[in-house]
Image (cartoon, grey):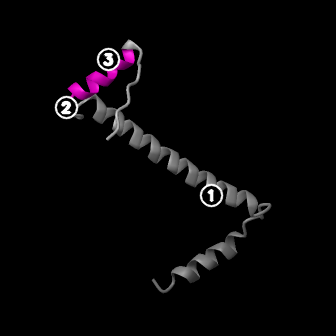
Amino acid sequence: MGTMNISLPDPMKSWVEEQSRSGRYANSSDYVRDLIRRDRLRSEAIAEIQGAVDVGLASGPAEALDRVAFKARMLEQHAGK
């Protein structure tokens, strides 16, 4: 495992140390690793959502929803379930 030294303002350093003292994390490194894991998951989720938005935008202009036809399609799809 690699080592990285970072500088934090005193209030941030105190916060990180308090998180490890709370018992949820074994030490400050565990807390920072958890933050990085969560940030990676958040970034991946944002990228997935952005991909879906891009697909939607590339699909062309929106069309008006025909509610009756939509309901009929849904009923057909779920009739055998």
Residue type of the residue flagged with mark 1: Ala
Q: Is residue 64 left or right of residue 45?
A: right
Residue that carries the numbered disc 2 in the rendered image: 23
Q: Residue at x 55, y 81 (%)?
A: 77
The quadrant in which residue 60 appears is: bottom right
User: Residue 6 location in percent, x, y?
Assistant: 40, 24
User: Residue 26 location in percent, x, y?
Assistant: 21, 34
Residue that carries the numbered disc 1 in the rendered image: 52
7 w.r.t. 37: above or below: above
Q: Residue at x 56, y 79 (%)?
A: 75
User: Residue 68 location in percent, x, y?
Assistant: 68, 74
Q: Is residue 24 left or right of residue 67?
A: left
How many numbered circles does the render carry?
A: 3
Residue that carries the numbered disc 3 in the rendered image: 14
Q: Which residue is outermost to the right? A: 61
Residue type of the residue flagged with mark 3: Ser
Q: Tag 2's secondary structure?
A: loop
Q: Decide whether the magenta segment is chiefly helix, strand or loop.
A: helix
The quadrant in which residue 27 appears is: top left
Q: Is residue 16 left or right of residue 6?
A: left
Tell whether label 1 touches label 2 (CB within 8 Å): no
Q: Which image quarter holds the C terminus?
A: bottom left
- Alpha carbon of mark 3 to alpha carbon of mark 2: how far? 15 Å
Please state which of residues 61 and 3 is positioned toward the viewer in this rendering.
3
